[in-house]
Amino acid sequence: MKAGFQRRRRRNLQIFRAIVLIAAGLYFLVPIGAMFEFSTRANDQVSRTLGAWKSIGTFPDLVTAITASIELAAITAVVMLVLLVPTMVWVRLKLPRLNRIVEFVCLLPLTIPAIVLVVGLYPMYLWMGTNLSDSILTLSFAYVVLVLPYSYRALDAGLSAIDVKTLSEAARSLGAGWLTVMTRVIAPNISNAILNACLLSVALVLGEYTIALNLFYNNLQVEIAQLGRTDAAVSIAVAVASLLFAFVLLTILSFVGRGRVVATGQTGK
Amino acid sequence: MTAAGNPALAITAGRPKEGGRRFSLDWLGTVPFLAYVAVFLFLPTLIIVAGAFVSADGGVTLGNFSAVTRSFVVRAALNSMLISLVTAVIGAALGAILTYAIALGSPNSVLRRMVTSACGVLAQFGGVTLAFAFLATIGPAGFVYVMLKDHGIDFYGNGYWIYDIRGLEVVYLYFQIPLMVLVFLPAVDGIKPQWREATESLGGNSWHYWRYVAGPLLFPAFLGGTLLLFANSFSAFATANALINQGGIILPQQISNYVSSETGGADAGVAQALAVLMIVIVTLVTVVYSLLQRRTSRWLQ
């Protein structure tokens, strides 16, 4: 009787699971499908056309914004790595007591929403615009702060899985300089964590809207929102493309993360 | 972390001669990072906090905070509170159900990985895109609305609520539910099947299990997730601004108007005062969240 009860419960759970997952799937997929549908509507509302997708290249402002956002994503990822990896390694090697402080500082942006941060950045960018540069690429200064918590977590997971101390002392005793230690010993050992941090940064920067809008820069999202008021089909085409791009990035990431767990499991033994 | 930290201490202790001199130089290694954070994180925060208490002529004042009592700011703040409360509670409840359904499957399945990365995208990626996704779905020209209308169901019979607070609530749930899945999944994964077996071998049924075992264990994580969702929607700006053109319906839009108004209503002091209030609320919520999270992580190992 007990076995029958358990079997029934397991079946009920499977039914519950299937219903919830199907509902969630519809809830997630229907809006994305609707965006495709909307972006391929022809003027007669009946036939289908890829006109909006093909005309993406004919909007110079949009192309500029896409290029700017890709450049911003690349610069942000590079600056983040150059700033964070050596610091985190150095703190682990020489200043273990500072570890908590670095962690606290890196996670701090989570409690300062972008809309709040931009209030403080506004006068700074005003000053930078007149005295240094008013290029849209200066946004990457702010974006590095924005991606700090996510990158820190990714890199921290990677560094915790390897023995930084032993690796770098072995390299140092063989005559390697600090640059060599970073680029040829530490970095290859945490390559998955670095990739994780980069993908997260890229996804975040490509989706950023608040800071760019309030500092009067037209990045991808600001341009999509503006274009939505004049040519909705094109802007929705770009929006769904960027959404799918972020999805692909994060799916790659989830497979990378799994590889790391397997790898550390082996070195642990 | 402790395993890596202890040998490190032991090794430094073994070389007392170098210790004193090297200690002072070691600090230099963190200078680039600290300098960067000082300029682009601490300085803006300082500008906000200091600016909030400074009047136009340079004196110390609380006048900027009096703007908080302006009727449209109060209304925006109440709207923000209401939207955050509604979407946090509904988002947490629905998110928890979805999390449980995901956790029932194999932890390494492709389905699970697809769902979690979809959640990552929706929870963190662009509010602008989500606003458009909903316009294309249930907007006045949207696919689902048009289809339902052809079948005699017109959910805009009483006006286009998608451009109002109710519309915002519906769209916000689209990133609130995925965020709940992301923060709640580790806790649900931590529930061991042995606990259920133990309950049953002691004669308990499903109700006993949820009421006395799984429920109390998951409740702090659930409450923490709800708080995080509240903070998340309280500080969200992009979705609302992309969906609703005439700004000012929620608090972040008011802040944006005061920072950089195209119509000349900018007032840095007021923007900074509102920003300070926002920091206070979000920080309070986040602190309680991390306390609850710590409580959960005690049995999560």
Image (tube, coloured by chain):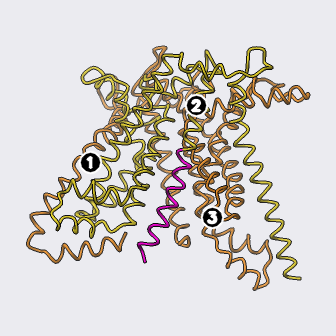
Chain colours: A yellow, B orange
Q: Residue at x 47, y 19 (%)?
A: B261
Q: Residue at x 49, y 50 (%)?
A: B284
Residue assigned mark 3: B107
C-alpha separation, residue under disc 3 versus residue under disc 2: 32 Å
Q: Hey, what amino acid is under mark 2? A: Val
Q: Is residue A264 above or below residue B156?
A: below
Mark 2 crowd level (few <14, some 14–19, many ≥20, 10 Å Cα): many
Residue B288 position in % (x across, y down): 52, 57
Image quadrant containing the N terminus of chain B: bottom left
Which of disc 2 and disc 3 is earlier in sequence?
A: 3
Residue assigned mark 2: B128
Chain letter of the residue beneath label 3 in the structure image: B
Q: Under tag 2, what secondary structure?
A: helix
Callout 3 and callout 1 share a chain: yes
Side of A129 relative to B260 (left or right): left
Count of marks placed on residues: 3
Residue assigned mark 1: B34
C-beta proximity under 8 Å, tags 3 and 1: no
